[in-house]
Structure formats: structure tokens, C-alpha cells
Image (cartoon, helix red, strand yellow):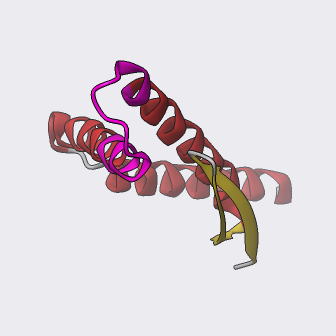
Amino acid sequence: MNIEQVHIEVMHAQLTVNTPAEEKDTLLQAVEMLNRKAEAIREGGRVADSEKIVIMAALNVVHDLLKISLNGDLAIGDFARKITDMDNACQKALSRLGQE
């Protein structure tokens, strides 16, 4: 697994995080989602402290994720593993077809 350092910005805070290279795009999507949620909270005007805004935004994102993962009793991680398993099975089948 190739680990990559990624420079991100969350509400004007610069951070460097390590992530598997294949998960970089997902990390950047998460940062974008968190920043959008934080901006919506900030624009709501009820909270001014940046740290509180980020915490509230993170709680909103996690809450949304939990609602999705509990729907139909299939957790997001289980769903991702099932897709990976199906992809692996397809790759094996295609490989076998190429050998015949």
C-alpha cells in the first residue's frame, strides 16, 4: 500500500495528512463535503467560533453517514467490501476468458 501525504484546508486551517494513495480522491471529497457543511453553518449565523463550526459540521456529516449506513441493514463498509469482492470476481472471470 502506497501512503501519500496530502495537504488539505478545512475552514482556512492548513493540514497535512497521510492517506493510502488509492483513497486520496475520497479524502479530498470528504474535505470538500466538510467545508460545505461548515460554510452552511457559518452562513446560518448562529455559531461564530470556527472550532465549533467544524465540530458541528463533522457531527452533521457523521450523522448523515449513520443514517445511510443503517438504511436496509447494510453498512457502508460492508457495501464497499461487496463491491470490491464483485470487482475481483469479474477480474478473475475476465482473466480466465483471456487464457482460453
Left or right of 53 on screen, residue 95: right
Q: Is residue 76 above or below residue 96?
A: above
Give 75 or 93, whichever is nearer the viewer.
75
Magenta: main secondary structure: helix
Give 33 or 75, whichever is nearer the viewer.
33
Q: Residue drawn at (68%, 49%), measured in percent from left and top?
A: 25
Q: Which residue is outermost to the front?
A: 48
Left or right of 89 on screen, residue 72: left
Q: Is residue 10 magenta?
A: no
Q: Residue drawn at (30%, 43%), measured in percent from left and top?
A: 56
Relative image position of residue 90 (x, y in whole percent): 62, 49
Left or right of 26 on screen, residue 97: right
Image quarter where the N terminus lies is bottom right
Q: Is residue 44 above or below residue 76?
A: above
Q: Is residue 51 magenta?
A: yes
Relative image position of residue 6 (x, y in whole percent): 73, 64
Q: Is residue 30 above or below residue 45?
A: below
Q: Which residues are magenta?
A: 41-57
